[in-house]
Amino acid sequence: MPDPKFAKPWHGVPREQIHWNPTVLEEACIGCGTCVTGCSRLVYRFDFERKKPVVADPLNCMVGCTTCANTCPAHAITFPPIETVLALESKSEVRHAVEDDLLARENALAAAEPPWADMITRVARAIGPAGRTPLEGLRRPTGAAVGNCAYSGIPRDLREWVAHASPLDLRPPFDI
Ligand code: SF4
Ligand code: SF4
């Protein structure tokens, strides 16, 4: 049975009106189960006796997704041509639905400034317009840790360079 969480209208178009789901070519399938376990929308079930996947809830399939086909080692999964989806996208009512959705969820979807942007700006300002790149004015402390900060993604050694320049008040605004 389709899950209403997945089989809901796609940008205003009822899901049952959209022909988009996988087809398994059984003669090519080697029964590895990757498609079954890899799909997060429970489109597939697995026939454990025949060792074959079954497309049990095609309407759960995400319109435009082809992950299971891309990861099938036997190339045993096909989809309708992507033009099926592109033709839908070209309809003005679909475009408007996308725009309405973007605006309705603006708070959640707005791209936030990366947390390290402020720090980089402060470094650049402090180093000044003396013709040097920002990092040229910072000494790398001996034994600086390597790898990236799990929170900011900034290389730890860069963060340590910045912290080392503390007389210029360049401490990162958050802890590693
Ligand atoms: S991933 Fe491909 S080979 Fe593996 S079970 Fe699915 S269809 Fe068959
Ligand atoms: S295309 Fe995506 S959503 Fe559809 S069955 Fe394959 S993995 Fe699941």
Image (cartoon, rainbow, N blue to C red):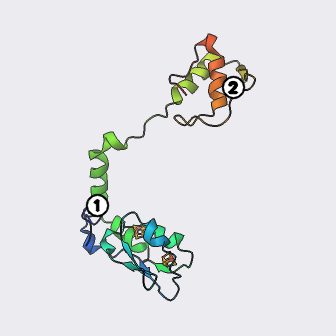
**Residue 154, can we see it?**
yes
Where's residue 40, x and y in %? 39, 63
* Quarter of the view holding residue 61: bottom left
- Residue at 25% x, 64% y: name it: 8
Q: Which mark is residue 135?
A: 2
**Residue 133, can we see it?**
no
- Residue at 73% x, 22% y: name it: 141
Q: Which mark is residue 11?
A: 1
Where's residue 132, x and y in %? 72, 23
Q: Nearer the viewer, residue 32 or 95?
A: 32
Q: Nearer the viewer, residue 18 or 149?
A: 149
As drawn, 140 above or below 38: above
As drawn, 158 above or below 164: below
Where's residue 32, x and y in %? 52, 76
Where's residue 14, x and y in %? 24, 68
**Left or right side of 78 for 168:** right
- Residue at 44% x, 76% y: name it: 81
